[in-house]
Image (tube, helix red, strand yellow):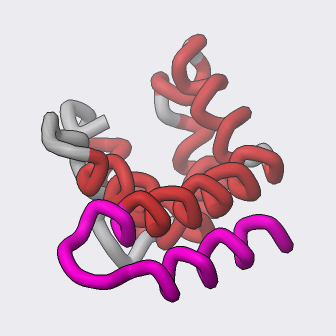
Amino acid sequence: MYKHTNILSLMSDFCDKELKKFCKTRFASHFLLIQSIIDAEEGLRHTVASSTWRNLQYSNNRDGRKVIEIIQNDEFWKEAKEIVVFFELLRLVDGDGSTAGYLYEAVERIRTT
């Protein structure tokens, strides 16, 4: 996506924030990437629904259609939000200090969702 200036320009029209880029580190970068996508959900949905997006050559190729399919898929957004909860749990147990109480609360929250 970052190689295509037309797409970046269009996204900036609908999204207030820039999406994080993937990097090879521990799970924190994955968490930040998913969280930034969730934060941009509304803007991403508006982007792929816009006439400007539909006029881009990328929107009509296989990858572009897949992007639209994913962004418009409510189940994708539901699962992304569930993944963030698990990343928060991992971050909790990976940190230093006493986390038993927080861990118990987090596990209970996961079980009830």
Residue at position x 51%, y 87% in the image: 101
Does residue 106 lie above or below 60 as drawn? below
**Which quadrant of the rendered structure holds the C terminus?**
bottom right
Q: Tell whether 61 sits left or right of 97.
A: right
Tell whether 87 sits left or right of 24. Answer: right
Q: Is residue 85 visible?
A: yes
Instruction: Give the vertical position of 26 relative to 101 (above or below).
Output: above
Residue 61 lies in quadrant:
top right
Q: Height in image: 92 above or below 86?
A: below
In this orientation, which residue lies closer to the viewer: 49 or 112? Answer: 112
The residue shown at (61%, 38%) is 54
Identify the residue shown where x is 55% and y is 58%.
Answer: 86
Position of 62 compared to 33: left or right? right
Residue extent of the magenta highlight: 91-113
Residue 91 coordinates in the image, percent (x, y): 35, 65
Q: Residue furthest top?
A: 62
Whether the magenta-drawn stretch holds residue 94 is answered as: yes
- Where residue 27 appears, as percent x and y from the top left, is 30, 47
- What is the chief secondary structure element of the magenta stretch? helix
Q: Which residue does the image show at 37% across and 44% down from the upper left?
A: 7
Residue 53 vertical position relative to residue 77 in the rendered view, above or below: above
Classify residue 63 as left or right of residue 5: right
Q: Quadrant of the N terminus?
A: top left
Percent of width and height locating residue 81: 63, 62
